[in-house]
């Protein structure tokens, strides 16, 4: 039978998707989702009644899922409008031309193949058939390079989702041929079947003038991301970022090839205690505190410019041992744990230098903890 796409039309097809979601979110990722039904072992929410879900099947077994929701189909869309800060778009385009995509998840066996695109294209064509022009969503920081390569872009500040943590809102202009060409999206060929939406592009440029560039290394020319870091820290990142000590510029470029930048506002919980996560962060500006959720006013460690955090999750794959909360406005480099593990195998000489730098950070923090305990 091979790999196929199924538009979930029947209760049985939808139930298979709900069960797949449970397996990925609850069993694999350990997320305590409020919508999870542990008796049925499925994950379903009220938005499913107003949405279309697609399943990626291998020999009839669900290995991926994605949901599309046109705003005009949602009986009470106020929470969605607020969640994604859609008010400017709603005034300009109306609910029939706006959708969200969500519940995008894949079995580990499907996360690196071309079958992903078939699922994305199915949802894209569904939205285009409905006349959608703007597509909203959100993602975890380490997934920004993937979504931006698809054609999404950032437009507003990060949000703290009570169930799913620190998320970056993202927006795709469905027929923005210029942007699609710039990020080299695999959706570009499909998008060219439809006319370029110059009106939507002009609206975005007027509405979000600070979001017209890219801050993800994989979407930039070689060396440009390192130059961007130098601008942000007003110095040489090879000297000022401890993680890069001992690397030549071309080695740092290779190491940062899938890095991106994210911003956090005061009070944002960038990392949450107890959640699974192997993403590594390096603070470029601002101050953040490591805290235990049971004692949120007691700082375990203070991070400033140049400091990495999240390294224990990266090195051990253990749940986060503490939360990291922005004390001030912060900006950080984000590196996916999955990318880093691949880099270790592909470029072991550079990786050894990075791991040595991380070990020095860990040793210094352990020494500081010991001093405080003795004190």
Image (cartoon, rainbow, N blue to C red):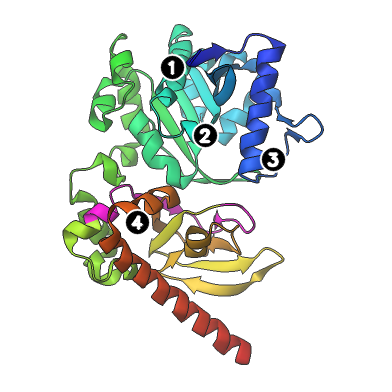
* Front of the two marks 4 and 3: 4
Tell me which residue sits at (42%, 50%) in the image: 336
> Residue at horizontal 26%, vertical 39%?
219
Give neighbour class at mark 1: few <14, some 14-19, many 20+ (Cα, 10 Å). some
Q: CA distance from mark 1 to mark 2?
A: 22 Å
Q: Along the horizontal axis of the image, is 77 left or right of 365?
A: right
Count residues near mark 3 (Cα–Cα under 10 Å), then give few for <14, some for 14-19, many for 20+.
Answer: some
Check disc 3 and report the residue beneath it: 33
Mark with earlier residue (1, 2): 2
Q: Secondary structure at mark 1?
A: helix
Name the residue at 59% across, 52% down.
Answer: 276
- Residue 23, image quadrant: top right
Is disc 2 placed on a helix, strand or loop? loop
**Circles 2, 4 touching at the beta carbon (< 8 Å):** no
Mark 2 or mark 4, earlier in chain: 2
Q: Position of residue 131 (x, y in %)?
A: 45, 9
From the viewer's perspective, is 248 left or right of 256? left
Q: Which mark is on residue 124?
A: 1
Name the mark nearer the viewer: 1 or 2.
1
The residue beneath circle 4 is 344
Looking at the rendered structure, the secondary structure element under dot 4 is helix
């Amino acid at each position: 039978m091979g790999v196929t796409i199924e538009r979930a039309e029947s209760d049985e097809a939808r139930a298979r998707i709900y069960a797949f979601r449970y397996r990925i979110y609850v069993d694999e990722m350990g997320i305590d989702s409020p919508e999870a039904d542990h008796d049925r072992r499925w994950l379903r929410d009220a938005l499913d009644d107003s949405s279309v879900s697609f399943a990626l099947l291998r020999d009839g077994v669900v290995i991926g899922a994605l949901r599309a929701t046109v705003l005009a189909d949602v009986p009470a869309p106020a929470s969605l409008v607020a969640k994604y800060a859609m008010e400017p778009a709603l005034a300009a385009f109306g609910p029939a031309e706006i959708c969200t995509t969500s519940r995008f998840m894949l079995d580990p066996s499907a996360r690196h193949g071309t079958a992903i695109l078939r699922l994305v294209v199915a949802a894209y064509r569904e939205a285009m058939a409905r006349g959608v022009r703007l597509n909203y969503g959100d993602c975890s920081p380490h997934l920004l390079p993937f979504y931006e390569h698809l054609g999404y872009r950032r437009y507003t500040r990060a949000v703290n989702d009570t169930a799913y943590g620190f998320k970056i809102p993202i927006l795709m202009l469905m027929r923005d041929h210029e942007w699609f060409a710039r990020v080299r999206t695999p959706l570009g060929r499909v998008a060219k079947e439809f006319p370029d939406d110059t009106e939507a592009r002009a609206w975005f440029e007027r509405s979000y003038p600070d979001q017209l560039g890219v801050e993800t290394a994989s979407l930039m020319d070689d060396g440009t991301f390192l130059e961007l870091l130098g601008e942000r820290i007003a110095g040489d990142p090879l000297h000022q970022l401890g993680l890069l000590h001992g690397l030549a510029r071309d080695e740092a470029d290779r190491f940062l090839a899938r890095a991106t930048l994210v911003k956090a506002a005061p009070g944002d919980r960038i990392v949450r205690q107890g959640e699974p996560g192997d993403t590594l962060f390096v603070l470029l500006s601002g101050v953040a505190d490591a805290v235990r959720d049971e004692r949120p006013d007691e700082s375990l460690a203070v991070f400033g410019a140049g400091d990495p955090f999240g390294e224990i999750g990266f090195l051990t794959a253990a749940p986060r041992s503490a939360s990291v909360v922005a004390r001030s406005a912060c900006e950080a480099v984000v590196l996916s744990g999955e990318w880093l593990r691949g880099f270790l195998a592909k470029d072991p000489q550079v990786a050894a230098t990075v791991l040595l730098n991380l070990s020095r950070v860990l040793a210094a923090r352990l020494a500081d903890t010991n001093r405080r305990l003795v004190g």
